[in-house]
Amino acid sequence: MPATPDPKTLAAFEGAKGFMPLDEGLALYAAAVEAGKLGLPLLEVGTYCGRSTVLLADAARAAGVSALTVDHHRGSEEQQPGWDYHDPETVDPEVGLMDTLPLFRRTLFRAGLEDHVIALVGRSPQIAAIWNSPLALVFIDGGHTDEHATADYEGWAPHIAEDGLLVIHDVFPHPEDEFTGQAPYRVYLRALASGAFTEIPATGSLRVLRRTEAGVRGRG
Ligand SMILES: C[S@@+](CC[C@H](N)C(=O)[O-])C[C@H]1O[C@@H](n2cnc3c(N)ncnc32)[C@H](O)[C@@H]1O
């Protein structure tokens, strides 16, 4: 039987704002449990309000590793005021900008998983540029433009250890199915074309690739 998250984790997942359906969340969790066996940290790009983070954190707790999650907490393009994915409750009225960090911290607290997560608050390429240690899993769910998705792939995929997993969200091969653009699909194709990854079955718009070879090309 596949491993399932703690009921408290699932309640926090369901209670958090976010875009991930439960079936994809369970597939992400299963990937995280498997990757956790490598004994290395799990990293997410795109925390938002912590909906997917709690699943990684639950798997990290079970594996005795940390879950790292990267976000500037100012929202992606499509989450800004006037766009389809905007939620007014994510705006800090004092500064007039989105700030999902307090909502994320609430989600994590509710899940009882604060001790298992390191939040990296900043721009993904800036953090990746100073990162220098191997990761068991990289989950890409940050900005959905080509610029951001490509930078996330180039910045983080080279740090995936052999047998580690690259998980990409919102992969839509058919333009008519996509809501936020096809940049994640192009990143997925690029990862496969690198020859460094082998795909394993996943669910919905989630794709899970195992790093089986060297040869992930980073920036340049
Ligand atoms: C689709 S949401 C993440 C959803 C979350 N994984 C979940 O399942 O609920 C994308 C997030 O990526 C963040 N983001 C976008 N571009 C970024 C960048 N260049 N660096 C850091 N965070 C970024 C946004 O602030 C936003 O919170």
Image (cartoon, rainbow, N blue to C red):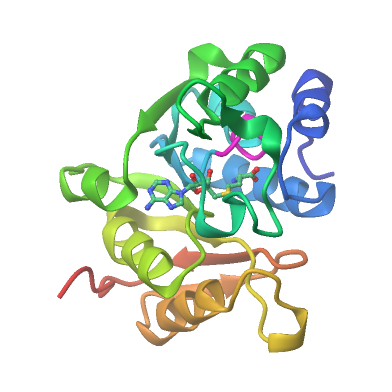
Name the residue located 67 percent from the left edge and 78 percent from the top edge: 172
Classified by dominant secondary structure, the portion drawn in magenta counts as loop
Query: Is residue 33 covered in magenta?
Result: no
Q: Is 182 left, or right, of 6 in this rendering?
A: left
Q: Is residue 173 visible?
A: yes
Viewer-proximal residue, 148 or 5?
Answer: 148
Q: Is 106 left, or right, of 100 in this rendering?
A: right
Viewer-proximal residue, 84 or 179?
Answer: 84
Name the residue located 71 percent from the left edge and 13 percent from the top edge: 110
Q: Is 2 left, or right, of 69 in this rendering?
A: right
Query: Is residue 50 covered in magenta?
Result: yes
Specify the quadrant of the image occupied by residue 55: top right
Q: Residue 6 appears at what percent x and percent y? A: 77, 23
Tell me the quarter of the image containing the N terminus.
top right
Q: Residue 163 appears at what percent x and percent y? A: 43, 58
Q: Residue 125 appears at what percent x and percent y? A: 27, 53
Span shown in magenta: 48-54
Viewer-proximal residue, 144 or 109?
Answer: 144
Specify the quadrant of the image occupied by residue 85: bottom right
Looking at the image, residue 55 lies above or below residue 145: above
Looking at the image, residue 103 lies above or below residue 148: above
Looking at the image, residue 92 lies above or below residue 22: above
Q: Is residue 174 visible?
A: no
Q: Residue 46 appears at what percent x and percent y? A: 50, 46
